[in-house]
Amino acid sequence: MIRRRQFLECLTALGGSYVLSACGGGGGGGSSNGAQAQAQGQTAGTSSNVGGTGASTSTATGSTLPATSTTTTASASTSVSASTSSSSSVPANGVPTTSSSGSGSSSSNSSSGSSSSSGSHSSATNNSPMASADGTAMPPATSIIDNQNAVWTLSNGYVSRNGLLAGNNYNVTLVLWIRGIIYSQGTGGQFYGWNGTIWLACNDPRLGGTSTDGTAIPPAPYIIDRVGALWTVVNGAVYRDNTPVGVTSNVALLLWYGGKLWYQDTGGQFHVCNDVDQWLPCRDPRTAVAATPGMFYGINGHYDYTYSPSQLVSFMRNLGCSTYRVGCTDDPVQLNAVVAIARAFQSAGLTLFVLIDSGLQDSNGNFFASESAAYNRSLTCGATVAAALAPYGVTMYECGNELTRANGIVVDSATAGTKAIDFNNANWPVMRGAMRGMIDGVKSRQPTAKCGINFCVADTGASDMLWDGLQPDGSSGYPTVRWDLTTWHNYEVYGDIFDIGADGNGPAFDLPTYCKARYGVPFLITEWNTGPEKSESYRANYVATQLASFYSARKTHNLQAAMYYVLDSGDTTYGIMINGVPIALPYNAFTSFTAAHADN
């Protein structure tokens, strides 16, 4: 738990919405290659992937979609503020980010993943009485008037503004005035938006913004993701911006759901695209899975509280909680304290969720020398804890606490954890061994017990490696880790877990949906709260809002429990009471919600 507090103090907010900075495409002060490519109506043929998210900065321009598609390709260049003829910026998907028409992308709600815009044209940004009608095109029009009353013309393939060449352009075949932005299209098919100084590569603005959550090919001809990349299926393979994405074949369905791209092959198997364009096997993410009721409301505590077990039972009942998470090792002092709690909870019909807090260091404080050394130590710890608690009805264990965020495991604690390279290759086997050892130790004493592995932030890079037996360097063939429960910590600073940010300022995604589809086991949020510096009123509002978000997902995302951190922190930083006395505002917010929303 100390590691979590230290991490929160050093981590800057990883929000659910990101904007990538544009870095190329087009001409007139941008890439000279891009300008030349537009001028020639040809493809410069270079693009660079940004953060592995599907965004790319393009110096290419004249490319078209594969022959089987009738739409034009998208550049994934992102928004740049416009010092222009309008107050909008030029986004990759051709929809102004400042438009009031509802055509920009929007954050998802807790149960639906990402959603977005219609492709309808709004005249809201065409605010000059002299401006041309929204959607005006040259040809057939002979000129366009923008919001600054500037006159745009197209002659011999050149676009001019008030009689002067607008940036570097030629071989232009079409000029559009849509939502307060001037767009041009070259003979190669690539579109550009004018930002007041240069032309930035973008989608055909008539295609609309980010595709609605759940859009699928077929029947849709294309999908536009949150960074404006345009996805298609050509001859059974998946393309993004006219380039194959990973290795795909026999694609029968391409799906945009929960901020991720998924495909189903002709054999029925689903795959999801990760942050480095690898397609991983999974289930259909759209399938709603209802968690088993009865343990949804939970709270964290510590083995060394001065409260008696009977007091803890009383607190739990007053809070409306059914699940209490507490950690221990095989140290007799810790374990005996947890056994006493387990005995009281068994009589009261409450659930004790035990964190086996075995670490990665030996008795000298050094990383274990090998995977087998870490495995053996954790095997002993897990077996000892399970043997002591099994007689008192404990059936669920969390095997390790924030190990993916331990010093020496995560390379940079500010990363979201969606990529394998976010983690230390040399020390990875030690963590894997410890996790495997705890699980095997528990199962050796309680074969039917449920074991969870814990992750933080958006650590799907870590969870996928463990599940598939991979190392951070990409090598394979290592022992896999199979858990019965996926457990996650979600503090406010990490972002909305249903719309959480990816590495490289990448687009946000619905993390519980991803885990539901990838691992197929119940999802538990075993720690959640806002920051320690927040006021009581802020915390109370956060408690009510988060409980509502979690509660609404329990029947669709297989969200089995949400455990507030913590019962008593000795002060107002995290706890909901101090020395048995409720902290009024957050406590009342919590109990009001549990009283009004049955765990059924």
Image (cartoon, grey):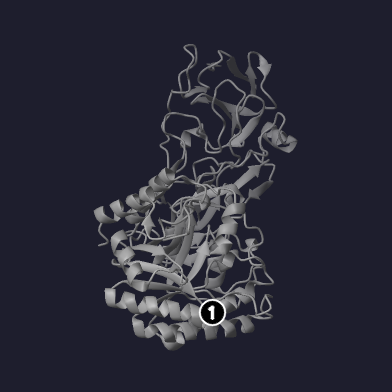
Label 1 secondary element: helix
Badge 1, how many Cα within 10 Å: few under 14, some, many 20+?
many
Q: Is residue 214 visible?
A: no
Q: Horizontally, is 453 left or right of 581 in the view?
A: right
Residue 355: % across, % down: 47, 72
Name the one closer to the observer, 164 or 534.
534
Residue 494 in percent (x, y) is at: 52, 52
Q: What number of labels is visible?
A: 1
Q: Is residue 119 left or right of residue 369?
A: left
* Nearest the eye: 545 or 515: 545
Q: Kindly give the residue lying farthest to the right in the view shown.
A: 32
Q: Can the viewer see residue 442? A: yes
Residue plotted at (47% across, 42% down): 210
Q: In which quarter of the image is residue 478?
A: bottom right
Of the pair 407 and 392, the residue shown nearer to us = 392
Q: In this rendering, would 5 be left or right of 424?
A: left
Q: Name the residue under label 1.
A: 436
The quadrant of the image that shows the C terminus is: bottom left
Q: Which amino acid does label 1 sit on?
A: Arg
Front-most of 503 and 28?
503
Up-down relation of residue 374 to residue 107 (above or below): below
Residue 81: x percent and y percent?
60, 30
Q: Quadrant of residue 443?
A: bottom left
